[in-house]
Image (cartoon, helix red, strand yellow):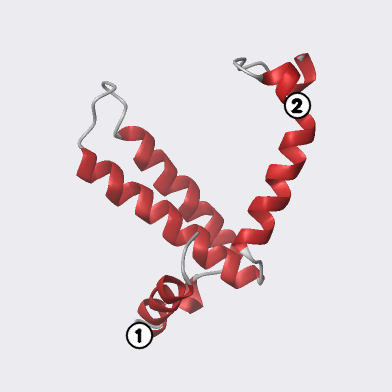
Amino acid sequence: MISEETIRKINAFTEERDWDQFHSPQNLAKSICIEAAELLECYQWGEDPDPEAVREELADVLNYCVQLSEKLGLDMDEILLRKLEKNARKYPVEKARGRNTKYTDL
């Protein structure tokens, strides 16, 4: 998971620039989508994108995800593990292994 030290550095970066005033949950959610689209753009014309561009765009997505979770007071480990447990129930191994079928069609 993302370390507390990394989270502190992200928060410090934002505070030093007085950008928190622009970081409403709505704006952060929009930024996640925008950066995710830029990540997808790396793969637009082929399956062999520039690895540095992928790293940078993925870092932008993660950065905004961290900021949104901080803004909402959510523990990223907790919400990820909770969702993983839910997905394990929706996609039991005996039905889902090796398949990309949506859970409603298993």
Picture quadrant where residue 99 is located:
top right
Which residue lies at the image location 26% right of the left edge and 21% below the top edge? 46
How many numbered marks appear? 2
In front: 13, or 101? 101
Type of the residue with mark 2: Pro
In front: 27, or 71? 71
Query: Disc 2 versus disc 1: distance between alpha carbons?
Result: 46 Å
Q: Which of the numbered marks, if any, corresponds to residue 16? A: 1
In front: 39, or 91? 91
Disc 1 element: helix
Which residue lies at the image location 72% right of the left edge and 36% below the top edge? 87
How crowded pointer 1 is (Cα within 10 Å; few <14, some 14-19, many 20+) is rated as few
Residue 92 position within the rendered picture, expressed as x and y whole percent measured from the top left: 75, 26
Q: Is residue 49 left or right of residue 39?
A: left
Up-down relation of residue 6 to residue 47 (above or below): below
Which residue lies at the image location 74% right of the left edge and 44% below the top edge? 85
Up-down relation of residue 84 to residue 90 (above or below): below
Residue 82 position within the rendered picture, expressed as x and y whole percent measured from the top left: 73, 51
Q: Is residue 40 left or right of residue 30?
A: left
Question: To which residue does mark 2 refer?
Answer: 92
**Going by the picture, which residue comes out furthest to the front?**
94
Which residue lies at the image location 36% right of the left edge and 54% below the top edge? 59
- Mark 2 vs 1, N-terminal side: 1
